Image (tube, rainbow, N blue to C red):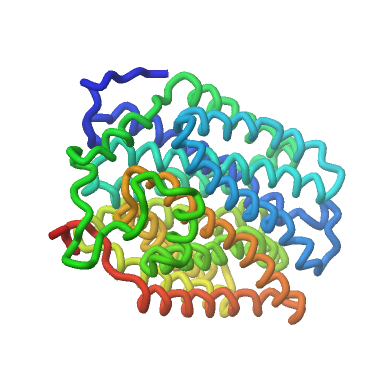
Amino acid sequence: MTDHSDAARQFGIRANLSQFLHQLLQVFLVGMAIGMMRNVIPALAETEFGVPRGSFVLLVAFVVAFGLVKGVMNFVAGRAAERFGRQRVLLTGWLVALPIPWLLFFAPSWNWVVAATVLLGINQGLAWSMTQTAKLDITRADQRGIVIGLNEFAGYVGVAVAGILTGYLAQWLGPRVGVLVFGLAVIVPGCLMAWHLVAETLPWARDGARPTSSGAAGNVRRAGHPRYPAGLPVQPTTVDVFLTMSWRDRRLAALCQAGLVEKFVDALVWVFWPLYLHQRGVSLPGIGWVVGVYGLVWGASQLVTGRLSDHYGRHRLNVAGMLLCGAGVAVMPLGSGMAWWSSAAAMTGLGMALLYPNLSAAVADITPPAWRASGIGIYRFWRDIGYAMGALAFGAVAAWGGSFEGAFGFVAGAMGVSALVLVVWGEETHPTLNPLR
């Protein structure tokens, strides 16, 4: 692990380019780890793992488990990172992932898939959280949009690439062998690189928390209205931070609920899109490409949308993204053919690109460095609980209606309502566009 003295510590992408690139590679591999579960596994739930046809609630069980576990681990990761350091938490996340390919290879039933997904939730909650937190530690406040945009770009390109590659590997080698080979090729290198190449960035976060640091540039935005949540000590308790993020500060609560609801979309894409397309005769590689368009547009567009928010603000992009994403989901089942489905996937991916990095950047804007990792962890807790809540809700809607279409409409409507809450409770958080005074 690389060591950095106090004298060598500087903030900014260029000043920490080597570590920044290491962390981008890490999140790309973390994205590939979840991507291997998002095409072959749902599409072959019935034929390969014995899930009865039409068992909508049983189908969503693995995503419910993933969301609950990942949400809790995001919360745990934030607090653990402040106590034990970012690199240790990242490495722990990779070690937990090592059994996943073997569980999927030997799985005699859907229960084993659920168990593998629990481990995946731990991996994602620990590892993805740390790649984002570490980048924010070593970069400047005016770079947060592009930093999170690059982080999510790398991660979701990894998700998309994995979905496409596993589709072809499943066709060539068989689903179990294909996932096993792919999983080991991703997880083992990720673990080794986290151990040997990734530096500990906690010292940067501690420097950023000092009053003299540029990372802690003031606490008052305008008279009577603090940038950071008021009434908290420098080192608040876990309960204080959780309540502040979840309800006491309406700005943060608006961001948390938006994060929760937008995961309804990703859960729908994960569980029902492959099944919906499979039932319409699309091959596994074809499913991989449609779902891959969603992930590739989402990932690649964040190179632009994260940077845009550094210049034009987070709030309008977040609201626009919620509405566009909901529209993409709504039109998906209204037509047919690869061109239609791919266009709907691209619309949904673009909406996610507008909102996904900028919700996180907004949280980082208004949480102080001393407990920013915890704040981001709690935001990510609520966001990823959205997998579980969304999957249960649209699974129940689909079961009640006996088809997928009701689930698409439910998720689109939820995105519209959430956007309205964000408009009413939220505000612009960019430190220049809504400056300190």
Instruction: Check the picture and name the quadrant holding the N terminus.
Output: top left
**Depth check: 325 or 392 in front?**
392
Instruction: Check the picture and name the quadrant holding the C terminus.
Output: bottom left
Q: Position of residue 277 (x, y in %)?
A: 65, 65
Q: Quadrant of residue 132?
A: top left
Residue at image point 16% right, 58% down: 436
- Asked whether, in this view, residue 128 is left or right of residue 314, the answer is right
Residue at image point 31% right, 26% down: 18
Q: Position of residue 37 (x, y in %)?
A: 65, 47
Residue 21 in view in this figure: yes
- Asked whether, in this view, residue 397 is left or right of residue 427, the answer is right
Q: Position of residue 90 (x, y in %)?
A: 51, 33
Q: Quadrant of residue 310?
A: bottom left
Which residue appears farthest toward the left when viewing the image? 437
Q: Position of residue 44 (x, y in %)?
A: 76, 54
Residue at image point 49% right, 53% down: 378
Residue at image point 86% right, 43% down: 108
